[in-house]
Amino acid sequence: MSVDAIGFSADLLKAVKNCGYKNLTPIQQQAIPLIRSGHDVLASAQTGTGKTAAFSLPILDAITKSLSDNQINSENRTIKALILTPTRELAAQVAKNITAYSQFLPLKTGVVYGGGKMPSQTKLLKTGVDVLVVTPGRLLEHLALRNVDLSHIKFLVLDEADRMLDMGFLTDIDKIISSIKQKHQTLMFSATFSNKVTTLAHQILKTPKTVGVAKQNATSGKVKQSVYWVSEERKRELLSELIGVNNWRQVLVFAGTKESANLLAKELKLDGIKAALCHGDKSQGARNKALEKFSEGSVRVLVATDVAARGLDIPDLPFVVNFHLPFLAEDYVHRIGRTGRAGKSGTAISLVSPKDERFLDNIEKLIGRQFERIIVPGYEIGRSLPEQYDGTEAVPLKKSRYRAVQEKNQLVAKKRNEKQASKKKKGKTTPDQKYNAKIKKKR
């Protein structure tokens, strides 16, 4: 269906076309008419299929049409649409998209999340916005300080509801909803329909319409998925080989913890592969800078934890790697959804060791698929595979130039250390000792 056929206002349609939209995606075709009719909606679709536009376009259209001339010209605005998101990255991305969709409309969009500066957020809220995108915890802080007024809310959106519940935001969501006393329309959008999501939907939605345009917990058919069978100790070495030999230029790698992400990024740099970090211990500014460098191509690898599984919208991202499989099988769907977005192709690989088998089994059951375990010659581990996976060896890979450089540097360092140790043993002055003596003399 063409975007012209949906009946948006001329200014909204102009902005949508400026953003490159020509046709509505399936989730947009189904959800937009229901939202415009005033129904509460529970919607699920694969990540990257246009959920943000599906809920924001009809909201922007409705708010604009309801404004009087005085309200349009007023400097003091009231929040009419509140959008809850689980992470800072997703909040920033949603706000960016809505700002683009409303570029020709007399509306103002704001974003508030943890890690941002409270004074500037307070000023934004006091001045007023028409659409506010938030993370739950930071919104509650502003509510406690009486910085925000929710008495004019007409639309409440829970974006990536399953992720918010997985992150423990249920109590925060309940507090926020109880703060909105007036009648409003509630929309829940989620990548999956978990038991938690359906339970919450029964509690907060009134006679909702359910929209699901894909098999639940399905992965995109455009994403090529592979599993490499390798020992835990050699995962990083294999990852460097795959990146170097295949000349992968933009790779999003998911690690299990912040500590393992730090170590992996450090080791990749030793292999000659530029890498940046994105996880919860990094400031928002550092995370934004890392993402910017990755998007523009100045670093080849972005090592992230699941804080980045939602909200990262990198155009044409070609590769996603699960260095560690996620604890929750549903997060596998979210992670690989960073590639193959909007009908484009992508590649997702998982490095799986024997200790990961139970996580892989859960993923296979969830998505209804059994993966071939690929064994790269030279990376075999001392245990037999299940019978169904016998004989699945991949084409041998040559040693990457990055690995060769690393081995050369390690050899040079080893020889230098041995030489200095030998001189020290014989009583000779080493270069380091000479340098230290020179510094002491100057002092």
Image (tube, rainbow, N blue to C red):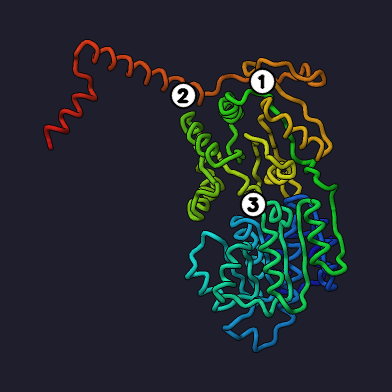
Answer above or below: position of 96 versus 398.
below
Residue at coordinates 42% horizontally, 21% vertically from top-left?
410
Res. 340 image quadrant = top right
Residue under pointer 1: 376
Residue receiving disc 2: 406
Tell me the crowding category of disc 3: few under 14, some 14 to 19, or many 20 or more residues within 10 angstroms, Cα based: many
Task: Indicate the position of residue 57 as horizontal and vertical percent values.
Answer: 74, 67
- What label does residue 157 carry, if any? none
Farthest residue, direction top: 426
Q: CA distance from mark 1 to mark 2?
A: 20 Å
Residue of label 3: 313
Q: Give the mark, 1 or 2, whose residue is nearer the N terminus.
A: 1
Residue type highlighted by circle 1: Val
- Up-down relation of residue 194 to residue 434 (above or below): below
Q: Are marks 1 and 2 in contact (CB under 8 Å)?
A: no
Task: Look at label 3 and name its amino acid.
Answer: Asp
Residue 210 point in image, percent of width and height: 86, 60
Determine the residue positioned at 51% across, 74% down: 123
Relative placement, left or right, of 173 versus 213 is left
Residues at discs 1 and 3 in contact (Cβ within 8 Å) = no
Q: In the image shown, does 389 or 239 lie closer to the viewer?
A: 389
- Residue 417 against residue 182 in the figure, above or below: above
Disc 3 versus disc 2: distance between alpha carbons? 33 Å
- Residue visible at 12% across and 37% down? 443
Q: Which element type, helix, strand or loop, lies under badge 1?
A: loop
**Foreground residue among 181 and 270:** 181
Q: Position of residue 205 (x, y in %)?
A: 81, 67
The image quadrant of residue 36 is bottom right
Instruction: Report x, y in % for residue 431.
Output: 23, 22
The amino acid type found where label 2 is placed reads: Gln
**Circle 1 Cα neighbour tier, 10 Å, few/some/many (<14 / 14–19 / ≥20):** some
